[in-house]
Each structure stands twice: as C-alpha cells, then as structure tokens.
C-alpha cells in the first residue's frame, strides 16, 4: 500500500511540476522549400473534405491509458478518463492503480484548471493564447485535443494552401538511407508510405501546418504544427483508428516534440455523441 501511495504522489508531483512552464515564439520570415505542387483547387477540395470529417461528432468520452515520455524515454503510464465537447471544452483525469483521481485538468473555453488531488492543490489560468504544455509537456491547446480525439484536424488558421505529392523519395536535405520527421518547415518530409501532404501557410508564406494523408486522400495519419520561426511545435500521429457509431476515431494517438517529450494515449473505451454538461469542464478547489 505504501508503494501505491508513493507512486501516486510521484505522478502528482511530476504533472504539477510542469504545469507552469512558459512557451513562446517570435516572428521570423522564412521561405519553405516545396515538393511538386498540385493545383490549388485540389487543396480547396481537400480542405473542404477535412472540415466535414466527423462533422456531427460534437461530444465524446473515453477511458484508457496515458504514457508520458521525456528525452525519448518512457517516464510513466497511468490510467485516464476524458471527455470533450466541440470546439474547445476538454477534461482529462489521471487515476492511480486503485482508480482514485490523482490529477485532473480541464478547459471550459475560457479557463484552464488543474487539481492535484493528492496534495489538495488548485491552479487556474486564462486559456486565451494558452496551451496545455504544463500538463502534457506538449504545447497543444484544448481545441487541438478535442479535434484530435474526435478523429479530425483543424484547417482554419491559414492564408494559403497547396497539396504536395509525398512519394517517399528523399529531399535535398534528407539522408537517402533513412526517413525522418521534419524538424522545421524548411525540410522536405520523407515518409515510407506514399500519399499526399496538405501544406498550410501564413502571412509571408511561412508554413504553419503539414497534414499527411494516405494515397486516397481520405485518411489523415499525421499532422505537424510549426511556430512562426519555422521550428516544429509538435506532431500528432493517428497510429491506429477504430469505427465508433459511424465515426472513425483514434484508438492510439501519439503527440511528440523534437526534444523527445510527448505522450501516447491508448483508448480502451470510446463513447461518441454522449451528453456532457458544461459544468463537467469547470474544476473547483478541493475541499
């Protein structure tokens, strides 16, 4: 029993210790290199398709496991339960091996809350321009998490778009002996699976997002989000998918950064289109 209590306290300290850690970016114009462009009209058609993907999935709940990584090494795995409501209401609770809540984090669209149940601590910060990096070690927003767990990606925050062929051949900055993920928006991606890449750009042509699709252009298997500096903010990968109530949603979702931080969410049960109260996404100080 002492070991279980100790493990629960370690989990709480680990998560609350990273809750308040600043993230920032600066504006530096860069000119990305591109693969062979397809017509811009094809990009518009693809964007329209992605915007309508799982369009009527407004709410969900799930239970499963979260595995945290640091420096590309597994830190810990814990049970979790979560709920989401479009567009940006999200809540997740990590539980001990006995099923007791250890740490809960939530966003109601205006505030981000965190409760450390083991130490009776409560944190709250305005969600405007904030991310959940303090909890996940990834600069992901609550609306990002809602979209990803609903089996879709955001394609709203951009000024121009292009569809590129992704034939698996290495680019000029790649080592032909191995494929790797892009570390900046100036690198040409190298993927073992043929398919397409939807590239979204902001302002002066800075790439802000790359969405990787299969050859049918129907299934997203990875998305990369970039800072305005061109550096990678994070990547999200739909490792495996499942069909729930007519919706295709993730059964394994992995988010990582290039410093080796990230987490893997394995879904054991998923409920689509369930009733959720707005109060579910508001946390209060423990009594």
Image (cartoon, rainbow, N blue to C red):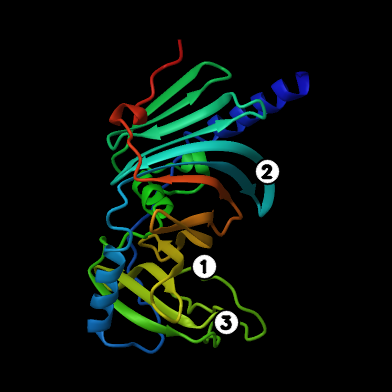
Q: Quadrant of the C terminus?
A: top left
* 92, above or below 124, in the image: below
Indicate which disc residue 61 carries. none
* 216, above or below 17, in the image: below
Q: State how far apart marks 3 and 1 are (Cα).
A: 11 Å
Left or right: 217, with 47 as reference point? right
Residue at coordinates 58% horizontally, 30% vertically from top-left?
A: 95
Q: Choose between 270 and 207: the one closer to the eye.
A: 270
Indicate which disc residue 183 carries. 1
Judged from the image, the secondary structure of the residue bearing numbered disc 1 is loop
Of marks 3 and 1, which one's residue comes earlier in the chain? 3
Residue at coordinates 38% horizontally, 89% vertically from top-left?
A: 36
Could you classify mark 3 by the number of other residues whose Cα lies within 10 Å: few (under 14), some (14-19), or many (20 or more)?
Answer: some
Figure disc tally: 3
Q: Nearer the viewer, mark 2 or mark 3?
A: 2
Q: Choose between 87 and 125: the one closer to the eye.
A: 87
Could you classify mark 2 by the number of other residues whose Cα lies within 10 Å: few (under 14), some (14-19), or many (20 or more)?
Answer: some
Residue at coordinates 44% horizontally, 65% vertically from top-left?
A: 223
Indicate which disc residue 75 carries. 2
User: Residue 237: percent from the left, percent from the top?
Assistant: 51, 62
Of marks 2 and 1, which one's residue comes earlier in the chain? 2
Indicate which disc residue 174 carries. 3
Judged from the image, the secondary structure of the residue bearing numbered disc 3 is loop
């Amino acid at each position: 029993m002492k070991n279980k209590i100790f493990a629960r306290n370690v989990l709480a300290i680990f998560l609350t210790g990273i809750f308040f850690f600043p993230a920032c970016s600066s504006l530096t114009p860069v000119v990305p290199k591109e693969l062979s462009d397809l017509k811009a009209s094809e990009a518009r058609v693809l964007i329209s398709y992605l915007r309508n993907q799982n369009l009527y999935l407004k709410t969900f709940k799930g239970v499963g496991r979260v595995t945290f990584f640091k420096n590309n090494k597994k830190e810990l795995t814990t049970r979790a339960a979560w709920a989401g409501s479009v567009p940006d209401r999200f809540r997740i609770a990590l539980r001990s091996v006995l099923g007791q809540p250890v740490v809960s984090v939530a966003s109601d669209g205006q505030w981000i809350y965190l409760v450390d149940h083991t130490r009776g601590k409560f944190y709250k910060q305005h969600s405007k321009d904030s991310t959940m990096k303090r909890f996940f070690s990834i600069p992901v927003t609550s609306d990002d998490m809602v979209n990803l767990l609903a089996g879709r990606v955001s394609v709203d925050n951009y000024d121009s778009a292009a569809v590129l062929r992704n034939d698996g051949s290495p680019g000029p900055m790649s080592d032909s002996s191995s494929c790797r993920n892009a570390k900046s928006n100036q690198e040409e991606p190298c993927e073992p699976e043929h398919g397409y890449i939807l590239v979204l750009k902001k302002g002066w042509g800075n790439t802000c997002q790359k969405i990787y699709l299969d050859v049918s252009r129907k299934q997203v298997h990875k998305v990369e989000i970039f800072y305005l500096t061109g550096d990678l903010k994070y990547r999200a990968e739909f490792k495996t998918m499942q069909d729930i109530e007519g919706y295709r949603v993730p059964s394994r979702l992995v988010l990582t950064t290039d410093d080796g931080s990230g987490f893997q969410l394995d879904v054991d049960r998923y409920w689509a289109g369930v009733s959720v109260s707005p109060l579910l996404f508001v946390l209060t100080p423990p009594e």
